[in-house]
Amino acid sequence: MVFVSALFASTFGLILGLALEVTKPHQILPHSQAHHLLEMIINIGRSIPFIILLVAIIPITRWIVGTSIGTVAAIVPLTIGAIPFTARLIEAALMELPEGLLDAAHAMGLSSLQIITKVFIPEALPGIFNSIIMTLVTLVNYSAMAGTIGGGGLGDVAIRYGYQRFDLKMMLLTVLILVLLVQLIQYAGHYLVKKCNHR
Amino acid sequence: MIELIGINKIYKRGTKTFHALRDINLHVKARKIFGVIGASGAGKSTLIRTINLLEQPSSGEVIVNGYHMTRLDKEELSLMRRKIGMIFQHFNLLSSRTVFQNIALPLELENSPKEKIHARVNELLNLVGLCDRAHAYPSQLSGGQKQRVAIARALASSPKVLLCDEATSSLDPQTTRSILSLLKEINAQLGLTILLITHEMDVVKSICDEVAIINEGHIVEQGAVSWFFGNAKTDLARNFIESTFQLKIPEEYLTRISSEPMEHSFPLVKLGFTGTTVNKPLISEASRIFEIDINILSADIEYAGGTKFGYLLAELVGESHQCEAARRFFIEHHVQLETLGYVTND
């Protein structure tokens, strides 16, 4: 549930984040109307508390998956909730790139698509991987809330047994597993970032 | 090879307008090295960026190798830019690619076959002297090495023109010299036309054939370097030239100098040698003819564009009418003479 959501969120978040960055005034595809629209969408997405979003998009979930209950259904709100977050992280990773890089890219006669594929993405890769890891960890967190609408998973166990049944042992156990999971994710992420970072 | 005709660039910031370039006219002949010098903010960066249209001129024509740059569509501009190489002050290499891959990038755009790319990159690595660092990443290189990679990358598509945007401003003097000599070599070997901008007159002195001075968006003066250093007309040009010469009156003389001749005082003169100065050993001749000692305190004499020029600070020690005659002698032989004061011996 978490990993699949992260996959979708990362893909759409990357596209959205790229779009957000390249439509800025001094970028390769400046378009102030598109930029403002994207800003608005992302800001709204970031403002809605996840637990409310979960319930609010039940109709959309039903339309895509056919039901609003269960692990697969939970993927929809998890993905939608994470996309604006991921987009902002990707935007930040792209903003880190030195301005002069664009000058060199233009001077070499690269097209906008070539700039995105040959310059932006490879150069920002450490930042992009970092964004994906952060998204993943955030989703582990959100998945607990998804448990409240029957999303299943560890979060669900923690809430049902730990919170609703006051079974402290169970709650602590699930939290421990979650902590270990996040450690593993961070460790793997750290390794990936290190491998691709030649700065 | 490069022509700028009536170029203007105006930036609008809210209600204010900033006139970065004013009616610029420039002609860079093929196979020549042309330098544009100016203080920070003078407009030289804007000027060089209009040549490959990194900056769109507000009005005027930019013609490179016969092509009117402002009239090209997006695709044509892309293709044209590959025929114009550019290097920058901060190198702008891709940190995620090795030296080899950085140089190969322009060739990848042309969809050249792999073997062709390999051969060409190796050729370029040889040219810039980096064969042993082909698989290093930019973060592992020194500034001079990074600039060499940048030069190799800029030359990958065999451009006819190379633009250098303050290419040596981030480098130490020794590295600057080696990069400049590499550029001079490339110009000679490949017949590459080079336009460079800088705020350091030394750069212009060492490799340029022609020079233009820019100030507040105007080209103040321009000409061949060999003519320029001795014959610059405007004060601004002269100031720039003089700023490159390190001439200081030593401390111990500063305390003993006065503006009027006094008893037992000797003139302290500044002698300026230019392209029009008679090419004879004037110092030793004057010393012999007028029986005076010429005590050289400070000197900076160089060659640029094949002409000897520079300045010399000297004390003329001898009888006052002989010193006077010596001064006239220098002036007659087209040495610029300025009496800075009179020094007394204690």
Image (cartoon, grey):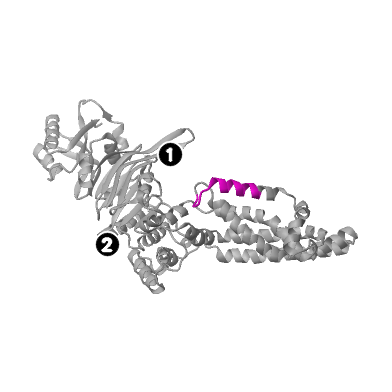
Query: Which of the 4 image quadrants contains residue B12?
Result: top left
Give percent across and percent down for residue A29.
Answer: 50, 52
Which mark's residue is nearer the viewer, 2 or 1?
1
Residue B81 magenta:
no
Give percent across and percent down for residue B122.
Answer: 37, 70
Give the answer, above or below, for where A124 lies relative to A39. below
Labels 2 and 1: the sequence-earlier one = 1
Residue segment shown in magenta: A27-42
**Residue at numbered disc 1:** B11
**Residue drawn 35% across the image and 47% down it:** B198
Q: What secondary structure characterizes most of the magenta part?
A: helix
Q: Amino acid at mark 2?
A: Leu
**Residue at numbered disc 2:** B190
Please tell me how crowded label 1 is: few (under 14), some (14-19), or many (20+) other residues with Cα within 10 Å.
few
Give percent across and percent down for residue A151.
Answer: 79, 62
Query: Which of the 4 image quadrants contains residue A178?
Result: bottom right
**Residue drawn 77% across the image and 65% down it:** A71
